[in-house]
Amino acid sequence: MPFRLFYRGPLKANGSKDDKHNLRTALHPQLAKLWTEEPLAHNQGFLTEQSDPKKIDLLYSAGSHTFICLVSERIKTYAELDILFLRPQPPGAIVSSGGDIDNRLKTLFDGLRRPLDSSELPTGSATHTIPSPCHCLLSDDALISRLSVTTDNLLDAKNKDEVILIITTTVKKVGVTYRNISYIE
């Protein structure tokens, strides 16, 4: 199941939990919309708490907040990511004043996944901006099985931290199980 996510904004090397939260909330509306389209639209039952252990529960909690993850170990899915990474440096400037690319990607990966516990939630008033539930791509960034990154120059950047990311995501099944047979086609 391939789809694209789009992000324009700051992406800092070694981003704070607030930086990661801003990524999550920027991507949340796109992921929420994805759940309304096939093949996910017929799986809305995943978006409510399940008391039956045979049913799939894709809801995760961190503090008093709930997160829904499209890619989850619970249904044995993983993600392949192809990222077009536009930033205000010329092609090839992988280590520069904007931060090295691997630390910026680590911030991105943490923003694509749910917070693992309440210590990863944003601080102060930003806590009130967490959608309920918040749609995330990944339950864990360890579920990224393949990564391709193409960098290029963002010619109209407003500052050194601004980027445009086009994240082509392909969700795949580890194996077909009763839990994921109709989830991802």
Image (spheres, grey):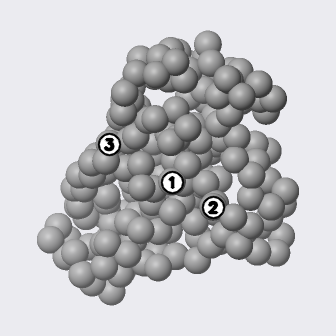
- Residue type at mark 3? Glu
Looking at the rendering, in which quadrant would you find the C terminus?
top left
**Residue 47 in sight in this render:** yes
Q: Position of residue 171 (x, y in %)?
A: 40, 33
Residue topped by disc 1: 140
Residue depicted at x 50% and y 42%: 73
The answer to which image quadrant residue 58 occupies is top right
Task: Compute the Cα span from label 1 to label 3.
Answer: 13 Å
Locate residue 26 relative to residue 155 in the image: left or right: right
Q: Position of residue 49 (x, y in %)?
A: 79, 33
Q: Earlier in the sequence, mark 1 or mark 3?
A: 3
Residue topped by disc 2: 116
Q: Relative to the observer, which residue lies in front, 43 or 8?
A: 43
Task: Compute the Cα span from label 2 to label 1.
Answer: 8 Å
Q: Earlier in the sequence, mark 2 or mark 3?
A: 3
User: Outermost residue toward the left?
Assistant: 92
**Residue 4 in sight in this render:** no
Residue depicted at x 52% and y 18%: 178
- Residue type at mark 1? Asp
Q: Relative to the observer, which residue lies in front, 30 or 159?
A: 30
Residue topped by disc 3: 80
Residue depicted at x 56% and y 28%: 34
